[in-house]
Each structure stands twice: as structure tokens, then as C-alpha cells.
Amino acid sequence: MTSRISTQAVHAGEERPKPYGALTTPIVQTSTYTFADTAEIMDFMHRKAAGDSPVRHEYGRYSNPTQVVVERKVAALDGGERALLFASGMSAITTTLSTLLSTGAHLVMVRDVNHRTMDFALLFLQRWGVETTLVAPDEPTAMAAAIRPNTRMIFSETPTNPYLRIMDLSRTVEIARQHHLMIVIDSTFATPVNLRPLEHGVDLVIHSATKFLAGHNDLLAGVVVGTNGILMEIEEARGILGGVSSPHDAYLLLRGLKTLDVRVCRQNENALRIAQFLEGHPAVRRVYYPGLPSHPEYEIAKRQMTCFGGVVSFEIEGDLEQTSRFIDRLRLPYIGPTLGGVESVVQQPATLYSIDPEEWQAGGIKDNLVRYAVGIEDAEDLMTDLSQALTGVQSTTRRVQ
Ligand SMILES: Cc1ncc(COP(=O)(O)O)c(C=O)c1O
């Protein structure tokens, strides 16, 4: 039976019946799995060698029953053959890139990716003899021009952070196919509710499940989704590098995933209303949201996404200090570095990026930029709060003029 995403979020991947007749998936809190005798070990080893997978669980660094249910659910949500769960989004990214790229390979990466992903490419992959070329998200010709005979992969996010740029997936997949490259998309900001990159021909999808997938700001996790063949290699690397998710975190993620569709739909609606409100406000210089016709990739976003996501970035009519004061006047959102949870969280990227202005400006971060990760609160309440904080901006702007 084919189900829609809200049904999949609740039911996909779940065993029925479950142990003890429980309705929820149990947390199997064990580090290892034991064998009755040597004959059982021998049987297990032979079946494993024959590629009979998964035969049973062996050791917690390789698999855990709670984790496997999460993996089946995420695979269903993203429309992949299989998914692998990791201890964090960064663990999913670093394990994937270090498995699929070897010395002498070249990587094309979109410049606007999460800065830790870029650090991994420029500091670690570089050290291991993998070169990276950074390209702009909106220049397919520059991307094609960056490809060399040893290029193996294109890596991007869509939407990107913090300017919410949108990659044209069909165009990028076309370039990747022409050059026989693998294409990996970090789809953390979109979630499978808004975008299913595998349906556009992408090879692998990655999420920081810490964000929307878990949705409650109470765990770190990452997932990679794709075909069995590629994921078997990455799974082998996960067992060596050790970036597994704990059974308890896997359970919390499973619980969060069940409400993914309802949460993300609410966040989509809230974010669109807030973006429209901010765009009409005199104390706001510019709004970055892919659901606004003013967004440079609005047409692409409309074509490739269902809705536009729960993050809105905007520039205040003011300088670094005025923007900080605006942030401090907000009463509802928490101030901090994450996104995608039920609580709204706001940040001024310049203050969280580095204490050195040259560094954040070199990273393309404007002094007056605000990133607002919208939660599931009432949109009217969030706008009333934004409005009172923006009134403060207008009065300080008037005073300095
Ligand atoms: C788009 C994106 N990818 C990956 C990561 C890394 O994920 P995690 O914090 O779960 O390691 C982040 C974290 O901010 C992110 O925003």
C-alpha cells in the first residue's frame, strides 16, 4: 500500500506486532548482543559473509534494533532504498565524504554550505589529498566549469544557510550525469515534507536530524539516504569510524519523526507569514525566503519544493549593534545556534560566526543579518513580538540620523 508522508511518518519502518505487544518501539539499551554457543556464532559469520544482511545484531557500533526502525522510517520518508543513522549531522557528512572520496579526487562544493561541512572539506579532505572547488549556488555554468577529469562529487545544500539559496536540482543532476559524478544534497533545511531530492535524480541525501527531523531540540543525529550499494560502503565506514547514534537518541528521534509532517507544515505556514510581514516592514532592509517572489530562485523553489521551509533570514535597517539590540528585545524566540525545533530560535549570524569581523564578512555574513528559525507557536504571537522589537529598531535608527 502506498502511503502519503504523514502516514509514513507515523507507521513506516515500525514492526507490527512489537515486542511485549507494546505500541511504541522499545529502546534496546544494550552495547552488545550475545550468542548461545559457538554454533550460533559460526552460523552468523557464514550468513554475514554471504551478504545475508541484516542477519541479527552483533555489537552496538554496527547496529541496534531501535536505530534500524529509524533508518527504515527515514528511508520511506525520503523515498530511498535505505538510510543510515549517525550520532550527528556532521558525523553523517564526514563519514560519507571520507568513504566516497579518496586521495587524488576532486570535490565541487557549493560555497553556501554549513561552515563546518566546508571546514571538513578544506581542512581535512585537503590534508588527505582531496581538493575542493567552491562554487556559487546560482551559477550552473561556473559549476560545470569547475569540473575536472578527477572530479568525483558535487555536494550542496538546498535551501542553504543562512541566505536560503535554492539549487536547481534538475540542472545540477544533468551536469553531474554528463560528467559521471555523484551528487550529494544536504536537505536539512527542506526535510522530506518539502523536498525529496532522490526523486530529482540525486544519489544521496543527508540530513542533520538534530533539526526538523527530531524537532524538539533534545538530541543530535544525522542520516544518509540512498541506494543499498552506496550505503553498504558507508555503513562499513560508520562501523570503523564509530559515529553511531545511541539507542535512546534513536528512540527520541523516532518519536519526533512521527509528528514531522504536522510540525513542518505549521513551520512552513508560520515562516511564510513572517517573511511576508517582514518584507512589508520599514525597519527591515531585505528578506531572504524562497517562498517570496523577491527571492532570486523563487521560480525554481516553486517548481521543486512543496513548501518553502521554516527558516527566514532578513537584514535589519541598522548596523551590528542595532541588530544585536533588536535580537535582545525579542521575547518569544530563544537566542542560539539551531533550527527546526518546536521552539522558535533566533540568531545574528555575525555574532555567532567569529569574534573577528573580517572572518564573518569573508564568509559572506552581513553585520545586520538575522536568522529566524520559526517554531510551531502561533504566527500572530510571533509577529506581535517581532513588531515590538522592530519598533525599537526604528526609534534607534531615527535617533542616530
Ligand atoms: C545544513 C546543515 N547540515 C549539517 C549540519 C550539522 O549537523 P549537526 O549539528 O547535527 O552535526 C548543520 C548544523 O547546523 C546544518 O545546518
Image (tube, grey):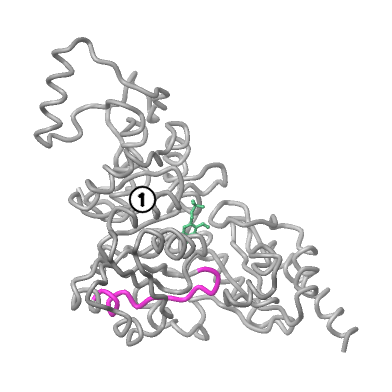
Q: Quadrant of residue 124?
A: bottom left
Q: Nearer the viewer, residue 65 or 110?
A: 110
Residue plotted at (34% across, 78% down)? 168
Is 174 situated left or right of 222 in this image? left
Q: Is residue 338 above or below residue 47?
A: below
Residue plotted at (30% across, 54% down)? 4
Q: Nearer the viewer, residue 42 or 213?
A: 42
How many labels were placed on the picture? 1
Is 316 situated left or right of 71 in this image? right
Q: Is residue 33 above or below residue 386?
A: above
Q: Which residue is mark 1?
A: 95
Residue plotted at (45% across, 65% down)? 122
Magenta residues span 161-173
In the picture as drawn, the residue positioned furthest to the top comes out as: 37
Q: Position of residue 217 (x, y in %)?
A: 57, 47
**Quarter that holds the C terminus:** bottom right
Q: Nearer the viewer, residue 176 or 360?
A: 360
Q: Quadrant of residue 144?
A: bottom left
Q: Is residue 164 above or below residue 337?
A: below
Disc 1 crowd rating (10 Å Cα; few below 14, some 14-19, many 20+) is: many
Is 375 situated left or right of 131 in this image? right
Q: Position of residue 231 (x, y in %)?
A: 24, 49
Q: Position of residue 18 (x, y in %)?
A: 31, 26
Residue plotted at (36% across, 58% down)? 128
Residue 171 falls within the magenta-colored stretch: yes
Residue 300 falls within the magenta-colored stretch: no
Question: Which element is circle 1 on?
Answer: helix
Magenta stretch, main secondary structure, is loop
Q: The disc labelled 1 sits on which kind of residue?
A: Thr
Q: Is mark 1 within 8 Å of ligand 1?
A: no
